[in-house]
Image (cartoon, coloured by chain):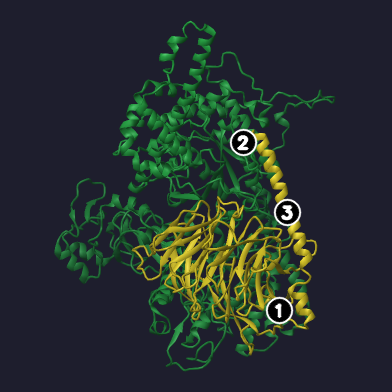
Chain colours: A yellow, B green
Amino acid sequence: MSVAELKERHMAATETVNSLRDRLRQQRLLLLDTDVAGYARSQGKTPVTFGPTDLVCCRTLQGHTGKVYSLDWTPERNRIVSASQDGRLIVWNALTSQKTHAIKLPCAWVMTCAFSPNGQSVACGGLDSMCSIFNLNTQTDNDGNMPVSRMLSGHKGYVSSCQYVPDEDTHLITASGDHTCVLWDITTGLRTSVFGGEFQSGHTSDVLSVSINGSNSRMFVSGSCDSTARLWDTRVASRAVRTFHGHEGDVNTVKFFPDGNRFGTGSDDGTCRLFDIRTGHQLQVYDQPHGDNEAPHVTSIAFSISGRLLFAGYTNGDCYVWDTLLAQVVLDLGSLQNSHDGRISCLGLSADGSALCTGSSDTNLKIWAFGGHRKVI
Amino acid sequence: MSLEVATVVEDAAEYSFAMEYHGPPITRELPRAVPINVDRIPVAAVVSPLAFSDNLSLPIVQPISATDIIGKKLSMDLKLSSSSAELLTVSPTSVIAFESRNNEVSEGSYSKELGLGTEISVSPSSVGNALDEREPENCHSNDVCALSGELSSDFECCHRDGGVNGTNERGYSSISPDNSCELGGVGTSEALGSLDSFEKSRDSSGSLHKSRLSSGFKESLDFNESNRTDWASNESVLSMDYLSSRVSSRKFGDGNNESGCDVRRAPVVTFCDIESDDENTNEEFTRSEPEVVRAKKEPAVKVKKGACYRCLKGNRFTEKEVCMVCDAKYCINCVLRAMGSMPEGRKCVTCIGYPIDESKRGYLGKCSRMLKRLLNDLEVRQIMKAEKLCEVNQLPPEYIYVNGRPLYHEELIMLQSCPNPPKKLKPGNYWYDKVSGLWGKEGQKPSQIISPHLNVGGPIKADASNGNTQVYINGREITKVELRMLKLAGVQCAGNPHFWVNDDGSYQEEGQKNTKGYIWGKAGTKLLCAVLSLPVPSKSSHPCGEQVTSMISRSMPDYLEQRAIQKLLLIGYSGSGTSTIFKQAKILYKDIPFSEDEREQIKLVIQSHVYSYIGILLEGRERFEEESLNDLRQNQCSDGSALAGHVDCNGEKTLYSICPRLKAFSDWLLKIMASGTLEAIFPAASREYAPLVEELWSNPAFQATYKRRSELETLPSVASYFLERAVEILKPDYKPSDVDILYAEHVTSSNGLSCVDFSFPESAYDDDADSGDLHDSLLRFQLIRLQAKGFGENCKWLEMFEDVRIVIFCVSLSDYDQFAIDGDGNAVNKMLLSKKFFENMVTHPTFDQMDFLLILNKFDMFEQKIEQVPLSQCDWFDDFHPVVSRNRPNNANHPTLGQLGFHYIAVKFKRLYAALTGRKLYVSLVKAMEPNSVDAALKYAREILNWDEDRPNFSLSEYSIYSTEASSFSH
């Protein structure tokens, strides 16, 4: 069989795959007779209302000198780690708003950071294609720098996102610009499994975000520049459990819904979407029309503890609070008094759901608490 | 080598080649250059100084339009306020007269107030005009030169206020500055507000502030009128250099402020009337302790004494934390709320970014008990660290005068980081004896001996320590105490000698060579010094030479590091030689370019590469063997069957055949390579196979293959460098040299990025005027190399490099006939891929307004290649038609084909860049293998950054010369 012939067959096969995909989408659309918002409205639900004191900025964490790129809470709720363009990780006490650690990174171009479940160490990754683990209990050296306690090297592209497997301090999942996700064993520093890459069912472009299912830590979802999100089972590295199409731009961020059966995505096409992992359907699109201007990209999302609210940061500086049921914007954090000056680049909800932390390109982080007499939602 | 470079560059400077015209024939007339008649060129006539008589009216730009506007706006108020009229009657038309009259009236009271007045000054935001006083007499000594016209008028009116009301309301002056001088863009409203608040607190009549204001304006306007002639003469000088708005503000300053002006330039006009007055105040000021120069930032709220500033509770016995800036005090419940996360230490949230109150400098980094109770250890440590190290809390260099000159930033760093820094450095006037290291406050005896030979401040003055003994040490008249000490130490001081004292205490008389003794040589002297509270050299003082060199290598505090580092981003399409340039920079500027670990790593990489090269050769050998066998067979067939019998018995042996043992090795190696596990196996197995490689290398078949290596496309061009030395390299004790590392591929971290911090070493042959500057030696650079892989359309993280100063884009010149597989699987010319990548980078939003330096690399290979392969191999270069003279070689004035090609490509890229951005592209020619060439390119990048900083000073024409003659840069 000649090369030309092979190429031809390959072309034909690709064609078939695409047409099948198209049919699948058609079929899905046919089956999708309603979305969450439509159903909720028919049930007579009303959107959440926010009073002026219901969500207030109660702390401002100042100390970074560059744009804040990423943040993460400890499970025991009172500490935050943030990563910034100034090449530092800062660990904050959210209650006193003080720094407890300022770690100067060997590679300043950090993109992501994560707290370990026991709160003893932090992980970060960036353009150096490594995931570095710092043990917060180690003594700093003479120059005041904290030594790296473990380097996880093996990615061939930048590390865009990392998250510890819940309740396991020794396992960590990273997403990378080399189109793969990797499950690491921190004690040995070796890769336990690689998701995607050589395997055809993997992402076909840079993976930008991962989120691990809170109720079943074997499942995780990844979002990529190929405008898809994929669901993976850590026991089956060879192929993705499911691929979620729908977005028309890079999927910048994915986050599991608190119940673990759904997940949300945010994308360059300016929309957030909610997908169901069991059916593979798209449940809802959260889209705010922006006139004829190009829609601002979604940079980061987070769900409230009940899942009723979806917080989404946009590149134009907005930070909408969506009612997930009715798909309506109920509040714009960016327009509130004493909000950030710059765009909000990362969001995180504390584990008990009582506070939201936002990191911004104005170098500050802010903690927003649900005030008033409102129950935590 | 360097010579060669030099000639190349010289050539480049001397010629430029015009391209042949290929367009359609021109129908219209070509414009001809008209010869210039030198006599007819208009020249500026010399202005005769006599032209400015007092009554000559010259057209002038009306100064301070803003004042006029405000004045108009306020004219209503003017009319309405009755008290203003009263004040106006007091003031005559000329402000000078007014001032003098005012002075006359209240001479006595002013003298008393002088001390009071000097305590106050400008708010921290207006750093430029640090000298600002509220005394009526001193009104004209405020420095408004740097301000815009509007602001200066505001200032003026406030000060006038002080002047007018100074006699009856002393307290006013102490309050107004913080508010009215908040500057920024504030206008009159701000001043009004401040006055308002003041008024309330002072309980004065409500209309008073209006009257003040209007009087202020009136006066400033009057002032303009009365001094018009002076300005006219002034303007004739100024208006040539400055924009009109600047001129007007300048003029205003001139009129008011003799002292402020002559700091900047020689005065053109002299105001006899004011000057005498000014000189005094100025003198007064510099003599006074500059500690008082800065205003205190007042807390936002006024509370009763002792209470917490936030909850307003508590008394003076409750424990409180104090803001380092505004002196606000907070109780334990409020401190965290009021001070937030304390990114700069203990400051109110509103005070963040403001310099601290100098009187509290001693408390920096010293934690209170309250904080310790409130926060845990780690948090406290972070706060104290931030407090001590953050930039805004550092000593402001402009408030430290050494030998009568304010320090620059770098000088202060040097002073503080020297082995023996002055203790408890506070803003103030100091003298410093560079030779002996003696250090003291101006007008006082020495207080300490610091490291000598620091290049800070001006030359020491004879009266620095205000001595009157007529005995001089290093040009300073010493004090009586010192003289007594010298006498007791046994130094002959008869006849008012001039001594020359070195830092080790050895002294000699001026003009004489022999050392007369050591002042601090005897133990008794030290004791004596202690009794007289004179300093003695500290034990830790080192020989002087060491100190200066160690200065640079000292680790700098964090905040300095952040500021001083200049980031250079090095990118290029894969194979363009960025890694070689990066390695070269490492070798050039680092003392230890590669650590032992790195070298070990590199050694393994090189070894495994050598195996892969051998593998490629062996593969080629099989092919050649097959080919030659085929040839042989065909030959035999054509020769006829007569010899067939012979062929069968020895026909399998050709030039390329090897013995079975090597054959087995070869098969095995090829199998491993095919399976892609070469890296996993090889460096480890190298000990075992090294002897085999030795045998293989000496094998004639292998050598024959090696001779035909140019036919093997997969073999990289550097392979021969390593293969020649394969036997040596594969030995276990092989240590890669710097050159080996330069040649080796994939030894810099293959994924993502690598960066190296360096500073250009000061070298003797560096003939740049400014390179010897202190500033430059502290300048540190960071070269960041990014792998081209991963720069897709979705390159989101490029914005992380928005803080780089310049992008160095690397293109391999020899790529023009090479092909690479692009994303769609098509073979595309590598030069075109490079071009596409270049376009992507140049138009990337992150690099908007970024300077680009194009490095055209691999010129050495290009020069060879262009002789054989025409440049038009690449579609982009199809219109390259060089004019090549017959007797080309050995003629220095004629550029070689390679140079022509380089210029052509450089122009191509420049045009492309100009079309995309409308700016100029800097181009540098580099042979990455040659250290000098890389050094020159990086220095060129530094020059570009320097130009960038002085860009406003460059006229356009100068600028374009630099950018077009880019390649003429050399060392």
Q: Amino acid at mark 3?
A: Leu
x, y percentage for residue B84? 71, 81
Label for residue B89?
Answer: 1
Instruction: State which chain disc 3 sits on.
Output: A
Name the residue located 73 percent from the left edge and 54 percent from the top edge: A20
User: Considering the image in quadrants, where does the N terminus of chain B appear?
Assistant: top left
The residue where tag 3 is placed is A20
- First reached walking from the N terminus: tag 1 or tag 2: 1
Disc 3 on helix, strand or loop?
A: helix
Number of residue marks: 3
Q: Amino acid at mark 1?
A: Thr
Disc 2 on helix, strand or loop?
A: helix
Are tags 1 and 3 found on a single chain?
Answer: no
Judge depth for marks 1 and 2 and give the one in front. Answer: 2
Are tags 1 and 2 found on a single chain?
Answer: yes
x, y percentage for residue A204? 62, 52
